[in-house]
Amino acid sequence: MTNIGKIRLALLILVVLGLTSVSIFGDRYTKLVLMLAFSYMALGQFWNLLGGYAGLVSLGQQSFIGLGGYTLAVTVLYYGFPMWLGVLSGGVIALLFALIISPAIFRMSGVYFSIGTWVVAESLAIWFSNWEYVEMGQGLFIKPANQLSISQLYYLAMLVGVGSVVLVYGVMRSRLGLALMAMRNDPGASQISGVSVFRNKLYCYLISSFCTGITAGVLYLNMVFIQPYKAFGIDWTVALLFIVIIGGIGTIEGPIIGAILYVLLQQYLSDYASVSLLILGGVAVIIMLIVPKGIMGTIQEKLGFEILSPRRHL
């Protein structure tokens, strides 16, 4: 292991130890806020894997969020699944759905791909709101057989958040990651050089959908109630775009910074729900004017500072 690798490992251990101590010494509110930050961090990482590295700008990740949440609710409420199996099932259902729609979605590119993913999510919202099996638009309460304590939920959310960073870092340091960045920079040239554009995009899409479904299950364990137009709503996309673009698209550290900022702003703006999106939009514009490539993107460009570089150095 190189010196840089040792430093990264030491930082990761220190961060995990610090976050673990919150479960012991932190109050309930602090744990809840950090749980939200972990979940949004993970969702941001998996959107960034698509949009930031593969060039697949999806406006429909809420499809997999909704499927993950509803699968958890149905399997736990109707079939008595244990919590962990309900969460895992949500990831599997999201992955299978992504596999089904990918041949049609991947026929589109650019803005048409983005619109196509959004249309899919809206179609799911309409379908679930008229599906008697899931109580239509009334929604479902999520009641695990064995209720988890706040500390257990905190550890679970932390595992998802930290795990998302480790997973995306590993993917981007692999041959798949190198192929994704090559396709993003020049799809035509990468295909001529022997890179299978469709196959690598499909792998990326499936990884993102599976992990997003699992993250949604963990998130909805804390939210307790799920309703179609919220679960499949465009608000999820707005949040993920804010997190990734403000933090720095195409950087692993970006969604971490963006998620923390988003959750903190969300807490401060809770008393101004009617104008919160407007304020978030204003904050995003101001930050983008100051740092056009996002916070971490600008830091990396100006200072050459990267903690988790996806590039392999010889």
Image (cartoon, grey):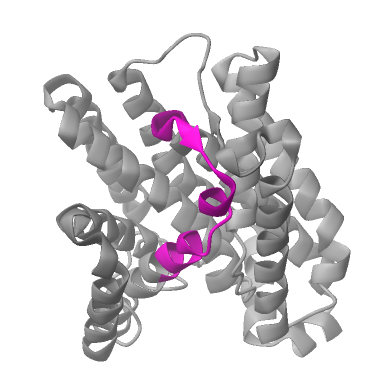
Furthest toward the top, the residue is 146
| Magenta-highlighted residues | 221-241
Q: Is residue 165 above or below residue 199?
A: above
- The residue located at (46%, 62%) in the rendering is 235
Residue 231 is a magenta residue: yes
Residue 76: x and y in percent read 61, 19
- The residue located at (39%, 52%) in the rendering is 41
- The residue located at (33%, 67%) in the rendering is 306
Depth check, front residue: 234 or 140? 140
The number of numbered discs placed on residues in the rendered structure image is 0
Q: Is residue 81 above or below residue 115?
A: above
Q: Is residue 238 above or below residue 8?
A: below
Relative placement, left or right, of 175 versus 299 is right
Residue 64 is a magenta residue: no
Q: Quadrant of residue 28?
A: top left
Q: Is residue 173 visible?
A: no
Q: Is residue 238 above or below residue 156?
A: below
Relative placement, left or right, of 88 versus 143 is right
Depth check, front residue: 231 or 211? 231
Depth check, front residue: 197 or 88? 88
Instruction: Tell me the chief SS of the magenta region.
Output: helix
Q: Quadrant of residue 160?
A: top left
Residue 120: x and y in percent read 72, 63
Residue 211: x and y in percent read 59, 44
Residue 163: x and y in percent read 46, 40
Q: Is residue 306 visible?
A: yes
Relative placement, left or right, of 228 versus 295 is right
